[in-house]
Amino acid sequence: MFTPTCLPVGSRKALLPSSDNPASDIRGTEPPTSAYRVEIEVDGVAMVRLLGPQDRLLSTIEKQYPGVDVLVRGNHITLTGEPGEVDAARTLVDELVLLVKNGSDLGPVEVTSSARILDSGSGSPAELLSQAILTSRGKSIRPKTLGQKQYVDAIDLNSIVFGIGPAGTGKTYLAMAKAVQALQRKEVDRIILSRPAIEAGERLGFLPGTLTDKIDPYLRPLYDALNEMMDPELVPKLLASGTVEVAPLAYMRGRTLNNSFIVLDEAQNTTPEQMKMFLTRLGFGSKMVVTGDITQVDLPAGASGLQLVTKVLSGIDDIHFARLTSADVVRHTLVGQIVDAYTAYDAKRQLEKFERTERAKPSRKNWGR
């Protein structure tokens, strides 16, 4: 149990070390005695799971509510500051405790996402983020942000889902987890994973070896994810039997894919013709998830099929476009900042281009001359 207790203004109960141990375990900054204060007693949860090794998550909690001072002593957490922010921080701590009790491993992403969910009034983070898609070798795979949760729910509800967003938002990883889940539940007979064989901005030339050896570098990220989600000894058997197929996009033409879960990764590097070809492979009892980042197109020339399809297929029933943002990045915190910086830079360039185009147009007063 966790027991929040509002202490009188000016009380220093939570700040005093125990008499038998003057150097008792006190972490955080001593708040002013005149502020609003709430004390939470955490029971049934190891504090290292709640606050991380060396209380690393303590600073993450404080960043969400800069006006709140957080002090930890043993299993007691004291929040001090303005009443509104203190109550919000208390709710966040309560939700984090529930997440830990539900089996989640907390990190900065979970803390930040939980705070955003609470601030937006979207519901309880403990309810939204606790449902695991898969559990493999003691590790649970579950959505970590509200955007990821909406993306996963869309996969359950629609036959074709497009996951569009920047790097690090879990687009492909979550799609593959849902594919493995569907196979384990016998909802589909096979998994088909595909990617266009396009280099990322550099020419690698002719690769040595057999056809499999040549395409393997392009498909390696998909193999890596499979080995994380399934028994590594089982994966080769499933590949050999055709239950799991990893193939380049060029192999999809002429096929009808029934009772399958199909994932197309790096779809921003498909041409419009390839995208149409791929989508029309959908057969009975199948699902498709198409993932990509429209800001990282490596095509040598021409339009991206992923960019075009958002205009062509929008509004069609049973097709959903899930758009993830930098707020859904679950890699290093710098990745989200990098994504935002490039987005702002691209927007600035587009504005400058538009302004140059407008200035180049002849003015109306010169039309008659």
Image (cartoon, rainbow, N blue to C red):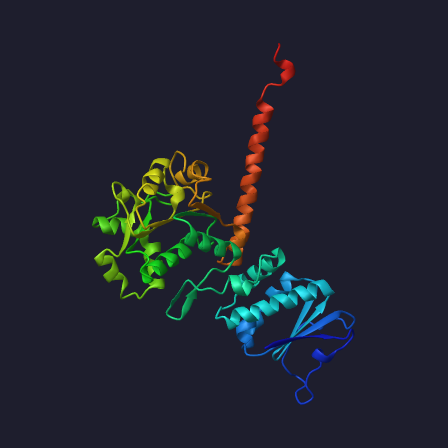
Residue 168 shows up from this direction:
no
Is 359 situated above or below 368?
below
- Asked where in the image residue 347 lies, by quadrant, the reply is top right
* Spot occupied by residue 61 in the image (x, y as percentages of width and height): 61, 65
Residue 261 seen: yes
Q: Nearer the viewer, residue 161 or 164?
A: 161
Q: Residue at x 48, y 71 (%)?
A: 103
Q: Position of residue 304 (x, y in %)?
A: 41, 38
Image position of 56 (left or right of 226): right
Camera-side residue of 189 and 60 = 189
Residue located at (35% from left, 58% from top): 182
Is 279 placed above or below 193 here?
A: above
Q: Position of residue 341 (x, y in %)?
A: 55, 47
Q: Nearer the viewer, residue 201 or 141?
A: 141
The image shows a total of numbered marks equal to: 0
Classify residue 42 by image quadrant. Answer: bottom right
Residue 210, given in percent of the width and then of the height, sits at 20, 50
The answer to which of 174 and 68 lies nearer the viewer is: 174
Q: Is 368 left, or right, of 311 in this rendering?
A: right
Q: Residue at x 32, y 51 (%)?
A: 285
Q: Is residue 116 left or right of residue 245?
A: right
Quadrant (top left/top right/bottom left/bottom right) for the C terminus: top right
User: Farthest residue toward the bottom?
Assistant: 20
Above or below: residue 168 compared with residue 343? below
Above or below residue 358? Residue 331 is below
